Amino acid sequence: MRRDSIPVGGAIVALVDSLGLEPVRALSDSSGRFDLRAPRSGTYRLRVDAVGFARVISVPFELAPQERRAQRIHLVAATQRLTSLEIRARSRCDVKPAEGTQVALLWTEAQKSLQASLLSAGRGPLLAYDQDLIDYDSAFRRVKASTRTSLAARADEGYSSASPRALRDLGYAQRLAGANVYFGPDARVLLSDDFAATHCFNIEDRDPTSGRRVGLRFSPIVAPKRGYIGITGVLWLDRESFSLDRVEFTYRPRQSDDHPDSTFGGTARFARLANGQVIISRWELRTPVFLSVIEMSTRVPTGNARASNERERLVVVRVARGTTRAVSDDPSPLPVVNASLRRGDPPPDCDGFVADPARSDLPGTVMDRAARGVTGVRVRASWTLLLADGAPAREQWAESGADAQGRFVLCALPRGVELTVVARSDRVTSTPTVLTLGAAPPTPLVLGVR
């Protein structure tokens, strides 16, 4: 708690042993309380870090076997506010910023929010969680496909990255199963030694959305090798509270000459709950989808033969995003599919969703009586699950908009649960189809509308 006896929630409390190791850590709750279990008896200290407060390290104390000890910690507000920062040495980019510098101050405060997010993972409350996958045309104007899965989940369940070592060695876009898979940095990546060893930091003071924030920009230390895709971005902090508002990043080098640098990348927004936990309340990832094209050239100088050249053409701008909300709140509208398709365009897929072995994707087509694809139709699968933590059963659902050929895909459907699937628009509807998905890939579903 603070000197004025006001409890501090969300403080990171670590138990430090005589060797300087941290066997356990925990977050304080809304009343400032925490509970740490020492692995063995011995001499320990408590180290407390909280956003906006100076670090506190307690005097050493002894813990006997089976002893339970109450410890009171007083925190002191940080004396330097971010509002008083004078932006200096703008061109300088520091690797592992030295203690006492402005860059180090910002990085220390950002780390506290990131560490609190890690400690909150898997422990946050169940919220309504909407995960969307939206495909736009190559001009990023019209919607070619859209799908949403809405369920009760914890905020961290939909946003996770690859291992820090894999991102350092292979990059933030990797070729997996014949397709480019793009990654964004999560808290574990940003706090890792692999990230710190390959990025430098400097101060960015112009948040385009609010003058209340100051940024810590991160950039690759060296130019990436050929074929390697890295990221550059900003961690934006509130100047008054020191809390981390969001992380923004873009991919480097630029992924398409037809779009500005800011098109492909992402954002993760952080929120502190009343119980002190820190969650990612909203996130978005914008990535390109390319199609290999064989081009025939004109005559080659040595004869009349024609040479072929393979290149990649941008066909889709894919937006994957997740949003948490109160269970009683309505979700935001999902964009309506309104783009015409080119010949040979592939059907919608769920490649932007986090893979889950307990769930399956269900593709299908909406057809009229003449066996023609019907566009402008919403397809919804709904089900009821008994939730963990004693929460009551609640209806959950996935929704997809049929494309210009009537094709759809419902993402992240649970296996072994009875699903009810219906296609509906203002003009047509289908008879409800009841099914249960098993371990094998499901047969594409055909829904007839009248």
Image (cartoon, rainbow, N blue to C red):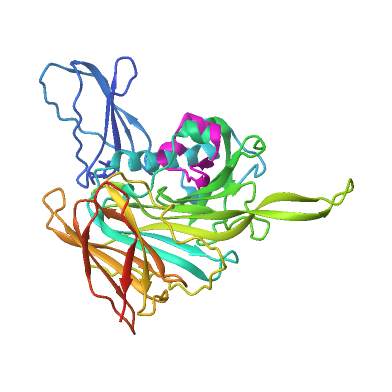
Could you tell me residue 383's position as x and y percent? Answer: 20, 61
Q: Nearer the viewer, residue 347 or 189?
A: 347
Q: Is residue 97 visible?
A: no
Q: Is residue 18 visible?
A: yes
Q: Quadrant of the N terminus?
A: top left
Q: Quadrant of the C terminus?
A: bottom left
Residue that appears at 48% across and 48% down: 82
Q: How many marks?
A: 0
Q: Nearer the viewer, residue 111 or 280?
A: 280
85 to 147, vertically: above or below: above
Location of residue 77 (image quadrant): top left
Could you tell me residue 280's position as x and y percent? Answer: 36, 51
Q: Nearer the viewer, residue 312 or 302?
A: 302
**Position of 128 compared to 241: left or right?**
left
Specify the segment rendered in magenta: 169-196
Q: Is residue 191 magenta?
A: yes
Could you tell me residue 157's position as x and y percent? Answer: 31, 47
Could you tell me residue 87's position as x and y percent? Answer: 60, 47
Q: Is residue 212 magenta?
A: no
The residue sitting at the bottom extreme is 427
Residue that appears at 48% across and 75% down: 338
Q: Nearer the viewer, residue 280 or 89?
A: 280
115 to 369, vertically: above or below: above
140 to 320, vertically: above or below: below
Residue that appears at 31% across and 51% down: 360
Location of residue 330 (image quadrant): bottom left
